[in-house]
Amino acid sequence: MPETSHSTTDTALIKVIETANWILRDGEMILSVRSHGRDRFYLPGGKIDPGETAREAIKREISEELGVDLVPGTLRKLGTFAGQGHNQPDGAVVRMTCFTGYYTGTLAPAGEIAELRWLSPRERHLIAPMGQKITAALFDI
């Protein structure tokens, strides 16, 4: 009987975390947020709830985190990016669906967000690894 090899990571066991994230630029600066108790900045947004679309999630998350409303007609999907999540167990994949769009209101940290900061390309090292990859892919072309 032929011997079968099995990889150490069974794809059925990989945890995939689906998120919706907002990319907002002001020139070269990109809006980033840091949650309470976290050491890195992230692209604003968060997990997509069961039964929720990525568009619904991004509107909800940005309202909860930053106290502003995204303008629905201006939301544009930039792409979906996947990789190892920061502070996630080995093998956990974060799949980030990224949007751009206009907002109404005044940006301010709310809920779980301790700080918001506009980061320059030179400060990209302050962003979690997936955010670094995404901003590099989108803006360093």
Image: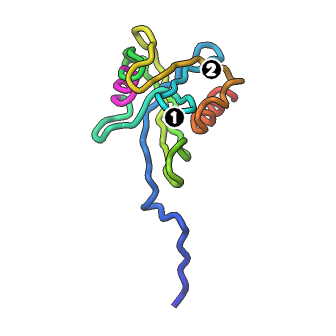
In the depicted structure, whether residue 69 falls above or below residue 17: above
What are the residue bounds of the magenta stretch?
56-63
- Identify the residue at the far front of this view: 37
Q: Secondary structure at mark 1?
A: strand
The picture quadrant where one finds residue 66 is top left
From the viewer's perspective, is the residue at label 2 or at label 1 nearer? Answer: 2
State how the image is colored.
rainbow
Residue at (43% x, 13% y) in the render:
103
The picture quadrant where one finds residue 109 is top left
User: In the rendering, at what x and y percent does residue 131 appear?
Assistant: 58, 33
Number of other residues with Cα within 10 Å of mark 1, as a class: few under 14, some 14 to 19, many 20 or more: few
Number of other residues with Cα within 10 Å of mark 2, as a class: few under 14, some 14 to 19, many 20 or more: many
Residue at (45% x, 24% y) in the render:
113
Residue 121 vs residue 64: left or right? right
Residue 107 vs residue 27: left or right? left
Name the amino acid type tagged 2: Leu
Q: Secondary structure at mark 2?
A: strand
76, 24: nearer the viewer: 24
Q: Which residue is mark 1?
A: 79
Q: Is residue 23 magenta?
A: no
19, 114: nearer the viewer: 114
User: In the rendering, at what x and y percent does residue 107 appear?
Assistant: 45, 12
Q: Which residue is mark 2?
A: 119
Is there CB contact under 8 Å for labels 2 and 1? no
* Mark toward the start of the polypeptide (2 vs 1): 1
Name the amino acid type tagged 1: Gly
The residues bearing labels 2 and 1 have C-alpha atoms spaced at a distance of 21 Å
User: In the rendering, at what x and y percent does residue 54 appear?
Assistant: 38, 33
Residue at (56% x, 18% y) in the render:
117
- Identify the residue at the far bottom of this view: 1
Q: Is residue 58 magenta?
A: yes
